[in-house]
């Protein structure tokens, strides 16, 4: 992490505390505002919960907010982070704290004499924290673009289309927070050391399947010793769905031919069954009317018949279908307009 990022990370905690404290005070003020009380027909909160008692509740809640924010990764404040992802994390973390408050509401009811103030505080905390983080990130982006403060000096290793495309993207988008300092074909430590001494390196991105494994292992060790972020772009995975894991003590990548595995498969199966039942019930009047018409038209044949199909893994399955008819005109010189029925049930 860059020094500027450490600075912004350090001031983020007190700023979050200020945002949470301000949101709680705003919620208390709005809740006890005469206009709001008249609209929502609420009783005065100040007579039921003294302001000093309310401040104690806020101060007791602040550590829980900060702790939950930390567990949600909201203090990883790299300048290269995505703002919308951070906003979702703020919403998620605030909701978790709200759930804890709701539990406390049932355990200690006299602490929260108004459900409205809990919901209002939840909304205001989310809004205030996101607003402050937006302003903070705007300052970071400005320093990044105009003063080059917080730029991640990046070394690209490899000679292929992926590396060339990555270099162009970084060059055209300075707000990403990266600066390509050099592009080399091999991962020899002597070359990387020389570049680091002359230009400095914060991150290394490698994408070349032809580089020897020994050189890659030495490069990873070098990055670990010198606190350099190492990233690897697999050249053969492209946009395939894959999963990282460990096998026999070694990192392994498994290519997923379909995302429907594990819980995804269970959820899909549950949805298939529930959806089928719902639509069968929904369309049952139509199916019943169709069955009656088939029986009236031709009472000799079955209403429903079985049909063979090929299902998953090549297994043969049977599907049930309503019998249907085909109509045609008989070609007869004596009776050219005579209509005849051709039954098709299979």
Image (cartoon, grey):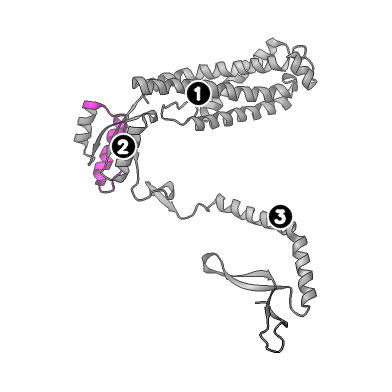
- Residue drawn 53% across the image and 29% down it: 87
**Local crowd at mark 1 within 10 Å, few (<14), some, or many (≥20)?**
some
Between marks 1 and 2, how big is the CA–CA gap?
Answer: 28 Å
Q: Is residue 340 magenta?
A: no
Look at the image and give the residue range highlighted in magenta. Answer: 198-226
Q: Which residue is mark 3?
A: 278
Which callout, 2 or 3, points to the residue nearer the camera?
2
Magenta highlight on residue 220: yes
- Tell me the quarter of the picture where residue 10 sits: top left
- Helix, strand or loop at disc 2? helix
Q: CA distance from mark 1 to mark 3?
A: 44 Å
324 above or below 204? below
**Residue 151 can be seen, yes or no:** yes
Which residue in the structure is indicated by mark 2?
A: 167
Residue 134, numbered label: 1
Total of numbered circles in the picture? 3
Answer left or right for 150 relative to 92.
left
Q: Residues within 10 Å of mark 3 (few under 14, many from 20)?
A: few
């Amino acid at each position: 992490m860059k020094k500027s990022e450490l600075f912004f990370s350090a001031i983020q905690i007190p700023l979050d505390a200020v945002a949470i404290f301000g949101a709680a005070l705003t919620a208390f003020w709005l809740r006890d505002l005469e206009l709001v009380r008249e609209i929502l027909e609420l009783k005065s909160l100040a007579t039921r919960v003294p302001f000093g008692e309310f401040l104690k509740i806020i101060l007791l809640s602040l550590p829980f907010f900060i702790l939950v924010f930390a567990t949600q990764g909201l203090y990883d404040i790299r300048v290269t982070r995505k703002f919308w992802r951070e906003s979702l994390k703020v919403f998620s973390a605030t909701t978790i704290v709200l759930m804890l408050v709701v539990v406390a509401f049932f355990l200690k009811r006299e602490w929260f004499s108004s459900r409205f103030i809990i919901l209002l505080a939840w909304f205001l905390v989310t809004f205030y924290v996101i607003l402050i983080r937006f302003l903070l990130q705007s300052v970071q982006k400005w320093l990044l673009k105009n003063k080059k403060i917080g730029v991640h000096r990046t070394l690209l290793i490899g000679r292929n289309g992926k590396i060339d495309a990555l270099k162009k993207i970084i060059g055209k988008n300075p707000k990403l927070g990266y600066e390509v300092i050099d592009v080399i074909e091999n991962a020899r430590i002597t070359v990387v050391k020389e570049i680091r001494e002359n230009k400095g390196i914060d991150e290394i991105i490698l994408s070349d399947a032809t580089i020897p494994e020994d050189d890659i292992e030495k490069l990873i060790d070098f990055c670990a010793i010198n606190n350099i972020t190492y990233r690897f772009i697999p050249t053969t995975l492209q946009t395939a769905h894959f999963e990282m894991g460990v096998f026999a003590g070694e990192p392994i990548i498994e290519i997923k031919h379909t995302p429907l595995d594990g819980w995804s498969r269970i959820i899909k199966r549950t949805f298939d069954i529930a959806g089928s039942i719902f639509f069968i019930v929904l369309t049952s009047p139509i199916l019943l009317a169709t069955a009656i018409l088939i029986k009236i038209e031709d009472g000799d044949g079955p209403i429903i018949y079985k049909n063979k199909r090929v299902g998953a893994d090549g297994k043969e399955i049977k599907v049930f279908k309503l019998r249907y008819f085909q109509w045609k005109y008989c070609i007869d010189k004596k009776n050219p307009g005579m209509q005849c029925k051709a039954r098709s049930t299979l």
